[in-house]
Image (cartoon, helix red, strand yellow):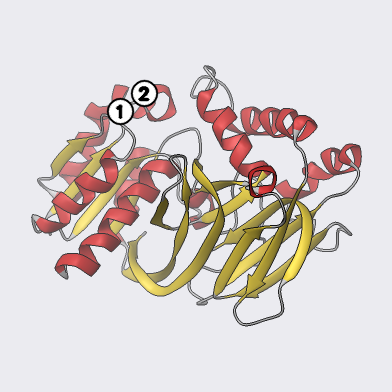
Amino acid sequence: MKVGVVLNPIAGGGRLKRRWAEAAASLKANFGGFDLRETQAAGDAERLAIDLAAGGCELVIAAGGDGTASEVADGLLQARDEIGRTSELGLLPCGAGIDFARGLGLPRGIDATLKLIADAKARKVDAGRVCYIDDHGKLASRHFINIASLGLSGATDRAVNADKRKGRVSTKALFFWRTVLEFVRYRFQDVRITIDDGEPVEARMALVAVANGKFFGGGMMIAPDAELSDGQFDIVIVRAANKIGLIRDIRLLYGGRHRNHPAITILRGRKVLVEPLGDVEKNGALVDIDGESPGRIPATFEILPGALTLRC
């Protein structure tokens, strides 16, 4: 099997890069030779994954956090669509956010993870595609593998990614602290949500999560019943409510104990359209895509059943 690796050298504050001799030895022991590519800037992992797939790699391992894994998956899905080359995705998680890996139950150790990838059978899982408005006001789109959302999560992403402590403090603590701080200053936004061909739902909301996986935000189980292979999203709507009460109840998200919360509605569907109501500038909520915030609504989210081949 021809194997490629896309390494984010600054993931987790550079922890994986500093242990690369150990990782390289394990890769050689489990797979033989491999083709290593390192990212230099945001968006590189997508391009490098396309190059590795086009070069004949049957397995591409994303070595980094959720952002790296998402970009690599996006590149592999583009390669499948554009050049007809289907490559499997493997994950060597390290970074400020490893929520997708958490949902898969991957081990923490480098050698244990790579041995699991080597021994596992590939399986088909769903992916998502989101169309949104980027920060330059242009229509943009990309794939996602875990969770895309909007509202408080987009603002929190930007704050976490700009925080100089990222990679040096506990991911859970950093996301929790930034979530609380952003929520204090957050202004609830009015949106219209249309799921499949159903009647639109209008809501003053704090957050809407369109979930393929279960976890986001450094360990919050926002979609406790989500499954990667069921051909549907779990859509979690957190409506405007008393801020002090919602901040207190954030703890419920970590254990997935929010299903019956009066401010939360969980629905299911294959396609989700979210539009701002009234003033577009005021209600153009920021979008979060697998831990990155590249733009805002209006946004359309579509499930791609069995589109990605995962090896873990």
In the image, 174: left or right of 138?
right
Residue 256 in the image: above or below residue 84: above
The three-letter code of the residue at mark 2 reads: Gly
For label 1, count other residues whose C-alpha is less than 10 Å away and answer few (under 14), some (14-19) or many (20+). some
On the image, numbered disc 2 is attached to which residue? 14
* Residue 109 in view here: yes
Q: Residue at x 27, y 49 (%)?
A: 61
- Specify the quadrant of the image occupied by residue 76: bottom left
* Residue 219 in view here: no
| Of the image marks 2 and 1, the number of the one nearer the N terminus | 1
In the image, 197: left or right of 89?
right
The three-letter code of the residue at mark 1 reads: Pro
Where residue 144 sits: x, y (%)? 43, 57
Residue 54 in the image: above or below residue 121: above
Specify the label residue 311 is tagged with.
none
For the C terminus, which image quadrant?
bottom left
- Specify the quadrant of the image occupied by residue 308: bottom left
Secondary structure of residue under mark 1: loop
Numbered-mark total: 2
On the image, numbered disc 1 is attached to which residue? 9
